[in-house]
Amino acid sequence: MTKLCLGGSFNPLHIAHLATARAVAEAKGFERVVLIPSARPPHKAEAAELAEPCHRLAMCQLVSRHDPFFEVDDIELTRDGPSYTVDTAEILKQRGWGKVAWLIGADMVPNLPTWHRSAQLLTTVDFYIAQRPGHEIDWAALPPAFQSLREQVVTTPLLEISASDIRQRVREGKSIRYLVPPEVERYVFERGLYLA
């Protein structure tokens, strides 16, 4: 079975994550999307707002129970240190994955050359890039090795939903319905997440 990985803090997992991942997976012939919650995303400085790993994992698992197109792997939550994509991909290959396909947003492409062991990353991972309408990538500004990723761009629906906005809405006592799956909405409020 061909699988497409989507890593992230999922703080919380929301509709744009799921709709984008499904659109790319269907466009490229993947049979399933693997959600990989990160323990400590190296490129994010929002640690103070980061829900405990157990909660972020649980929200992903709830979604996968309601939609078998998605599955969850806690690979990054069960090891120490920052969640480097290249390390995760190498472990997946040790588990028997032939190729590791990984979805990233177009907004992450300019930073890819700064990722941990970036040269090896390109030989270990097959990247697919979710391109939102109106967000252009300056390919000429990237090192030559990264310019070949231009062939891996998939146009996805324009959904302007952000986890930080969802957390702000929770703090303000506003509804997050239609921004997150119903099971995630219930979980967030039952556990009192993002109130502080």
Image (cartoon, grey):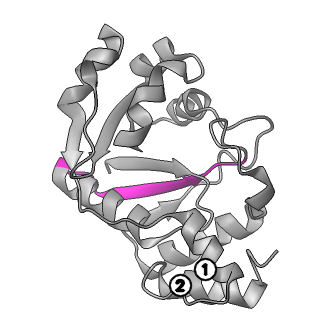
Q: Quadrant of residue 109?
A: top left
Q: Is residue 152 visible?
A: yes
Q: Residue at x 64, y 48 (%)?
A: 38
What's the mark number on residue 169? 1
The region drawn magenta spans: 28-39
Q: Residue at x 56, y 69 (%)?
A: 165
Front of the two marks 1 and 2: 1
Q: CA distance from mark 1 to mark 2?
A: 7 Å
Q: Is residue 191 left or right of residue 180?
A: right
Q: Say which quadrant the C terminus sits in.
A: bottom right
Asked if disc 1 and disc 2 are in contact, CB closer than 8 Å, the reply is yes
- Residue that label 2 marks: 176
Q: Is residue 98 visible?
A: no
Q: Residues within 10 Å of mark 2 (few under 14, many from 20)?
A: many
Residue 148: x and y, percent? Answer: 24, 19
- Mark 2: amino acid: Ile
Q: Residue at x 23, y 34 (%)?
A: 152
Residue 2: x and y, percent? Answer: 31, 48
Q: Is residue 151 above or below residue 130?
A: above
